[in-house]
């Protein structure tokens, strides 16, 4: 609450295209391919003056400049977190997708470890293969995730031994993989409730 009171006059005192104030963070956004760097420096100077007037300090260690586009400035960083989304300077979200997949991997691992037949339901969740599918065609596209549709070969072409049950194979899309996995689990639990 005090942070908001201290920074209440910030929008009036900073010259930038958009100012986003949050509970504990402030983002200055400038949109102009020719003078964005100059506008950003002016906005940062304005912010320092405003902070100083309110007895606050600008934490230079946490202050980041993310230039989005082809012409990057020397002091610009490659990626930054903005409202939980990892923004990249080339406007590709592969870093964000990789972070989400890492989080999903641990959730899926926990879900699988809670199931009775977890040995037959484990499937690899590879951030590199899923992230690459966002930008280019994945080598695993079209592979099945459904127990009934699973083939007798792995995604890499190796044969599955006869005594090993068919297991889901990733298709290259994290959301699709999670959706199919959850559908298999839901269907299985519904079948168990009926019997």
Image (spheres, rainbow, N blue to C red):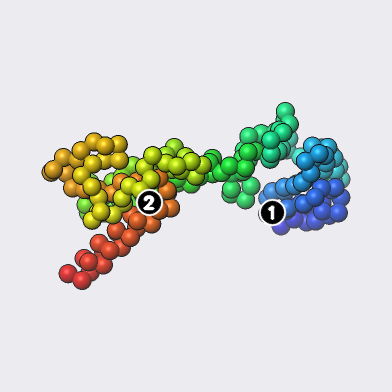
Q: Nearer the viewer, residue 13 or 140?
A: 140
Mark found first going from the N terminus, 1 or 2: 1
Residue drawn at point x = 82 percent, y = 48 percent: 16
The total of numbered circles placed on residues is 2
Mark pair 1, 2: CA separation? 34 Å
Q: Quadrant of residue 72?
A: top right
Residue farthest bottom in this picture: 194
Where is residue 165? Give x, y as percent: 18, 47
Mark 1 highlights which residue? Answer: 22
Q: Quadrant of the C terminus?
A: bottom left
Identify the mark at residue 177; answer none if there is no mark.
Answer: 2
Q: Quadrant of residue 75?
A: top right
Residue drawn at point x = 21 percent, y = 65 percent: 192
Where is residue 96? Give x, y as percent: 54, 44
Tell me if residue 75 comes above or below residue 175 in the rendering.
above
Q: Quadrant of the N terminus?
A: bottom right
Q: Nearer the viewer, residue 25 or 15?
A: 15
Residue drawn at point x = 73 percent, y = 31 percent: 73
| Secondary-structure class at tag 1 | loop
């Amino acid at each position: 609450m005090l942070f908001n009171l201290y920074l209440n006059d910030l929008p009036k005192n900073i010259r930038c295209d958009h100012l986003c104030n949050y509970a504990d963070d402030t983002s200055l956004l400038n949109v102009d391919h020719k003078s964005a760097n100059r506008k950003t420096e002016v906005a940062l100077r304005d912010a320092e003056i405003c902070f100083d007037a309110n007895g606050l300090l600008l934490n230079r260690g946490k202050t980041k400049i993310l230039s989005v586009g082809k012409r990057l400035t020397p002091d610009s960083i490659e990626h930054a977190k903005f409202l939980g989304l990892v923004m990249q300077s080339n406007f590709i979200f592969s870093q964000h997708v990789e972070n989400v997949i890492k989080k999903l991997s641990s959730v899926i691992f926990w879900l699988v470890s809670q199931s009775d037949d977890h040995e037959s339901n484990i499937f690899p969740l590879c951030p590199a293969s899923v992230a690459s599918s966002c930008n280019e065609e994945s080598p695993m596209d079209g592979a099945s995730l459904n127990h009934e549709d699973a083939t007798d070969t792995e995604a890499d072409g190796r044969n599955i031994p006869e005594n090993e049950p068919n297991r889901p194979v990733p298709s290259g899309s994290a959301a699709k993989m999670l959706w199919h996995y959850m559908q298999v689990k839901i269907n299985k639990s519904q079948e168990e409730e009926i019997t």
